[in-house]
Image (tube, rainbow, N blue to C red):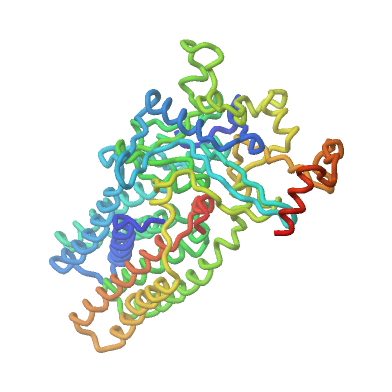
């Protein structure tokens, strides 16, 4: 059913720390790996080793440059995947009921056997979170690793989305954003977590933590600098002679 | 947006076909027998042909029947229902006029209304998308309906009605282009809101996620040169409205009428190509493409 649930019991989602992300793309690779081998149709590539390779990805990392009015520009790596919106337009536009939002945890999923591959859900998503797989003809999207997070065959430490498990910088966090006492909710409150394109009215569950302000370089670069000042201002002896001779040349 | 031939053919032909069905359902012209057969054959050819074309871009056309299930929330599903109901009712009405020489008015009027409803639901598929500000305007359904009515009247040979309807459609087209050109800026969405970093300074897309292209770029990021688009707008306007209006003012003859219809069809198809090709999806912002 592609009507959205009134509310969900939990709001499982990701918190992505733009301050910490180093832009290594490890989450992209681990996402592709896990989701190609597990839930649903594999994420195909076209012309993978040819001149014009392209493929289906559920998570992509952009990089942006932000130039403040004063001071140096900042480079921000920006991972982007499905935000599992509360008011997900991709769910309501679906004509077949293939696209749905789960009542129990708020995860937005696609029932691939019902998907006709019309692409309208991808049109309705402002974030580019959905991609029509070119080999399978069905819509692919982030499942929040629904086949990991409840999977009792995995060690407990692995029962989190593949991207979160992989991130070497600890820039990705997973949890219940509907519970104000969860670690992720506290993190969002503490760091001023934000929505992407709030004006679209999608009410994303995933939050982004803004980069912390950069340190300002004032007059003194290093408090140890005075202690490291050269002791001898004028070279003496052989070096002094060399200095003078070279200057004469 | 990628201007896929299947959706351009679909919306252009079925818009015209359902416009013709609207007038036939109202008994304009009140035809029967072979003449009615020809009129209905043209109307069904256009509307059904268009609907068939729309299935070409589906990943799994064999599952198309599932699209009738979600009429409560999905405009695409509602469009399917309206189209099928309109075609069935108009089919019954056509049987009456073609084989029995009788006008079963209830079927005709209901079928006519459902034909318009089909065009409206088609337009709402595009209008509902907040991600594409150029489509997310009240003028979008007005444009689809005014085109369909003008084309339908032209095809039904309703000269007196067609003339004002063509002029109205022409006006709507100009207003749509004017408002559409400002829609993305007016929406307030830019790379700053897309990344949430706008308050910190000027945001610039530094590096895309991939060196190659992807589905999102192919489907949503189609950039038409401004000069190119302006020329096409002029061509489409002349063909869709100016030429048919001039031909309608000439003394009636079937050959001129045919030319007027073909010119209108070519103009509407060009306008529809621009409707897709010029539509800016906000996901392009993430790629620095707007």
Left or right of B225 on screen, residue A164: right
Name the residue rendered at 30%, 65% in the picture.
B16
Name the residue rendered at 33%, 37% in the picture.
A45
- Asked whether B5 or A190 is in front, the reply is A190
Q: In this view, does A143 lie above or below B14?
A: above
The image position of residue A108, as x and y in percent, is 50, 32
Count of marks overlaid on the render = 0
Can residue A80 be seen here? yes
Q: Is residue A175 above or below residue A238?
A: above
The image position of residue A210, as x and y in percent, is 68, 40
Query: Which quadrant of the figure contains the N terminus of chain B?
Result: bottom left
- Asked whether B212 or B55 is in front, the reply is B212
Q: In this view, does B33 lie above or below A123?
A: below
Left or right of A63 on screen, residue B78: left
Left or right of B73 on screen, residue B7: left
The image position of residue A12, as x and y in percent, is 58, 27
- Asked whether B281 or B288 is in front, the reply is B288
Name the residue rendered at 18%, 61% in the picture.
B41
The image position of residue A28, as x and y in percent, is 48, 34
- Asked whether A152 or A157 is in front, the reply is A157
Query: Where is residue B202, by image quadrant?
Result: bottom right
Can residue B136 be seen here? no
Q: Is residue B171 above or below residue B83?
A: below
């Amino acid at each position: 059913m592609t009507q959205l649930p009134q509310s969900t019991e939990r709001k499982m989602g990701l918190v992505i720390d733009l301050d910490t992300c180093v832009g290594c793309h490890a989450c992209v690779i681990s996402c592709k790996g896990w989701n190609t081998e597990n839930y649903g149709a594999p994420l195909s590539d076209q012309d993978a080793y040819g001149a014009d390779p392209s493929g289906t990805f559920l998570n992509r990392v952009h990089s942006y440059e932000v130039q403040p009015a004063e001071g140096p520009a900042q480079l921000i790596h920006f991972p982007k995947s499905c935000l599992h919106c509360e008011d997900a337009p991709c769910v309501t536009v679906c004509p077949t009921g293939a696209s749905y939002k789960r009542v129990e945890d708020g995860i937005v999923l696609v029932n691939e056997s019902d998907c006709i591959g019309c692409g309208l859900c991808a049109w309705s998503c402002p974030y580019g979170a959905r991609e029509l797989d070119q080999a399978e003809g069905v819509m692919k999207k982030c499942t929040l690793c629904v086949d990991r997070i409840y999977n009792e065959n995995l060690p407990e430490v692995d029962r989190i989305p593949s991207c979160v498990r992989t991130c070497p910088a600890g820039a990705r966090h997973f949890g219940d954003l509907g519970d104000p006492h969860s670690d992720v909710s506290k993190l969002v409150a503490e760091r001023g977590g934000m929505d992407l394109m709030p004006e679209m009215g999608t009410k994303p569950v995933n939050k982004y933590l803004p980069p912390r302000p950069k340190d300002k370089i004032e007059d003194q670069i290093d408090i140890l600098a005075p202690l490291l000042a050269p002791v001898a201002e004028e070279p003496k002896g052989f070096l002094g002679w060399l200095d003078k001779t070279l200057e004469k040349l | 947006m990628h201007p896929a031939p299947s959706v351009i053919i679909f919306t252009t032909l079925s818009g015209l076909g359902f416009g013709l069905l609207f007038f036939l359902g109202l008994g304009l012209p009140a035809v029967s027998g072979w003449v009615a057969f020809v009129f209905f054959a043209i109307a069904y050819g256009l509307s059904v042909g268009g609907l068939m074309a729309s299935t070409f871009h589906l990943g799994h056309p064999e599952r198309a029947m599932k699209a009738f299930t979600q009429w409560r929330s999905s405009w695409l599903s509602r469009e399917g229902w309206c189209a099928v109901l309109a075609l069935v009712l108009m089919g019954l009405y056509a049987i009456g006029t073609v084989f029995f020489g009788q006008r079963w008015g209830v079927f005709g009027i209901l079928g006519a209304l459902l034909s318009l409803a089909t065009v409206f639901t088609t337009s709402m598929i595009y209008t509902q998308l907040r991600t594409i500000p150029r489509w997310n305007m009240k003028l979008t359904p007005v444009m689809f309906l005014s085109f369909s009515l003008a084309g339908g009247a032209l095809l039904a040979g309703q000269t007196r009605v067609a003339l004002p309807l063509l002029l109205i459609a022409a006006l709507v087209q100009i207003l749509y282009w004017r408002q559409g050109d400002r829609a993305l800026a007016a929406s307030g969405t830019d790379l700053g809101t897309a990344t949430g970093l706008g308050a910190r300074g000027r945001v610039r897309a530094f590096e895309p996620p991939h060196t190659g292209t992807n589905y999102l770029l192919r489907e949503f990021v189609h950039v038409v040169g401004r000069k190119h688009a302006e020329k096409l707008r002029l061509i489409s306007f002349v063909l869709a409205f100016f030429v048919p209006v001039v031909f309608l003012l000439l003394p009636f003859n079937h050959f001129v009428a045919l030319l007027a219809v073909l010119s209108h069809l070519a103009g509407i198809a060009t306008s529809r190509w621009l409707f897709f090709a010029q539509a800016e999806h906000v996901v392009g912002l993430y790629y620095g493409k707007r």
